[in-house]
């Protein structure tokens, strides 16, 4: 315990009560200091004294105002105990105006003179313990505020690091597209026979080059889209869109993959006239991504289903598969960027783990959401919830940041 908060300031302007109280307290190993006037007492209060012992006769109107001024500027956690030595028989008769005024403004203990030494010592020690609790509360609050400030600084630093990462990804993606466009251009020239006829082996190699180029370009587009969503630079053209049109278009786009993997795609509950207020292209991107993911993780002979479930204010589009499922410990993190269920170097499924993160961010930016339920060995069900729109809803042009 620091020395100052253990100290007792004594102010008794007349008689020998002041020096006597200091002497008695010192004999009981209590650190007491005599304040000759109210200014000295107020100075002790301002320096963080532990306890004040003051005689009733010191509480004149002028000294009370000086005392109140010193108490009023104390921090909110500080409530200095005031031990007031009253006149003999005062408690048995009535409380003077001076004592009453101080009692209303401070943490007051009244001791009637003549005072037994044991009573004074007990009262001072009890007051010092109460004062120590105040300092402990102050230290706790200060430490808590320090930790909160440290947490705020760490969060701000992490957010800035994330923004720097996003900027880096965007720049690198743009830089990578330039050589990829050149690869695509020269591949097309070779395919057209500009540089001479190709053999079957050369044409097969060219097909592999073109497939790899398209795959890499798709990954780069994912990174760019993610960067735009994260930085709030992605524009949304909201309009009333028919859910049946979205689903049938998705079916047409994924049909070749469905056939090549020997899978079955079913649709249910999707009727014409059920409108959602969305950006058509971005919603189509979400649905294609969900079905493509389902195709990746569903063995041959399996089934993928798209269902529409409308209600009063929204429409739920579900994509369900009979695939391998997602482990329960991985499920909460699959919408985080760059997260993949299978992180082994030998994994057979391509991608950098941005598809679901982008899809959920796009859904939330349009006022919807994307959630998932899954069981290992039984498959997964992704639910895209979208806001329902009325017929003839006006078109809205928005720039939206990612909704986290």
Image: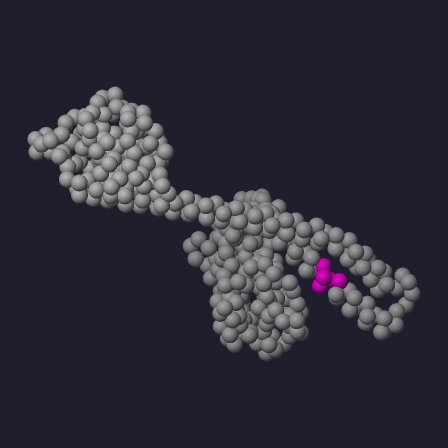
Point out residue 394 in the picture as x, y percentages from the top left corner: 53, 44
Q: Residue at x 8, y 33 (%)?
A: 92
Front-lying residue, 376 or 78: 78
Residue 32 located left or right of residue 265: left
Q: Residue at x 32, y 36 (%)?
A: 49
Point out residue 317 in the picture as x, y percentages from the top left corner: 51, 61
Residue 171 located left or right of residue 361: right
- Res. 383 in view: no
Q: Residue at x 79, y 68 (%)?
A: 207
Point out residue 195 in the picture as x, y percentages from the top left corner: 91, 62
Q: Quadrant of residue 288?
A: bottom right
Coloration of the structure image = one colour
- The secondary structure that most of the magenta stretch takes on is helix
Residue 277 located left or right of residue 255: left
Q: Is residue 195 above or below residue 237?
A: below
Name the residue furthest right. 196
Residue numbers of the magenta segment: 213-217
* Residue 1 counted in the magenta span: no
Question: Where, quadrant-wise, is the N terminus in this rendering?
Answer: top left
Q: Is residue 370 above or below residue 208?
A: above
């Amino acid at each position: 315990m620091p020395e100052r908060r253990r100290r007792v300031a004594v102010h008794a302007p007349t008689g020998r009560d002041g020096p006597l109280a200091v002497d008695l307290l010192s004999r009981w190993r209590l650190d007491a200091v005599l304040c000759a006037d109210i200014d000295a007492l107020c100075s002790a209060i301002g320096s963080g004294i532990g306890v004040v012992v003051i005689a009733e006769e010191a509480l004149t109107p002028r000294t009370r105002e000086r005392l109140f001024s010193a108490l009023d500027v104390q921090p909110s956690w500080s409530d200095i105990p005031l031990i007031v030595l009253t006149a003999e028989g005062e408690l048995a008769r009535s409380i003077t105006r001076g004592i009453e005024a101080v009692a209303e403004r401070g943490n007051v203990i009244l001791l009637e003179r003549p005072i037994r030494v044991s009573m004074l010592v007990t009262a001072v020690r009890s007051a010092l313990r109460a004062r120590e609790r105040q300092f402990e509360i102050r230290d706790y609050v200060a430490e808590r505020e320090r930790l909160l400030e440290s947490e705020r600084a760490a969060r701000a630093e992490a957010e800035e690091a994330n923004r720097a990462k996003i900027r880096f990804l965007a720049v690198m993606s743009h830089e990578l597209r330039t050589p990829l466009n050149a690869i695509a251009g020269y591949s097309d020239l070779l395919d057209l026979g500009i540089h001479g006829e190709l053999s079957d082996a050369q044409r097969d190699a060219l097909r592999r080059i073109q497939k790899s180029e398209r795959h890499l370009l798709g990954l780069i587009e994912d990174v760019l889209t993610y960067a735009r969503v994260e930085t709030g630079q992605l524009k949304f053209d909201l309009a009333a869109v028919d859910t049946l049109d979205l689903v049938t278009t998705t079916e047409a786009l994924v049909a070749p993959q469905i056939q090549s993997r020997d899978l079955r795609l079913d649709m249910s509950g999707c009727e014409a006239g059920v409108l959602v207020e969305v950006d058509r292209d971005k919603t189509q991107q979400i649905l294609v991504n969900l079905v493509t993911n389902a195709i990746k993780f569903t063995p041959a002979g399996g089934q993928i289903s798209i269902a529409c479930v409308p209600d009063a204010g929204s429409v739920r589009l579900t994509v369900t598969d009979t695939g391998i499922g997602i482990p329960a410990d991985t499920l909460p993190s699959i919408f985080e960027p760059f997260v993949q269920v299978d992180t082994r170097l030998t994994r057979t499924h391509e991608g950098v783990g941005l598809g679901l993160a982008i899809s959920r961010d796009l859904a939330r930016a349009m006022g919807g959401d994307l959630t998932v339920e899954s069981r290992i060995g039984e498959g997964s069900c992704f639910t895209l919830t979208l806001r329902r729109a009325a017929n003839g809803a006006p078109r809205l042009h928005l720039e939206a940041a990612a909704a986290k």
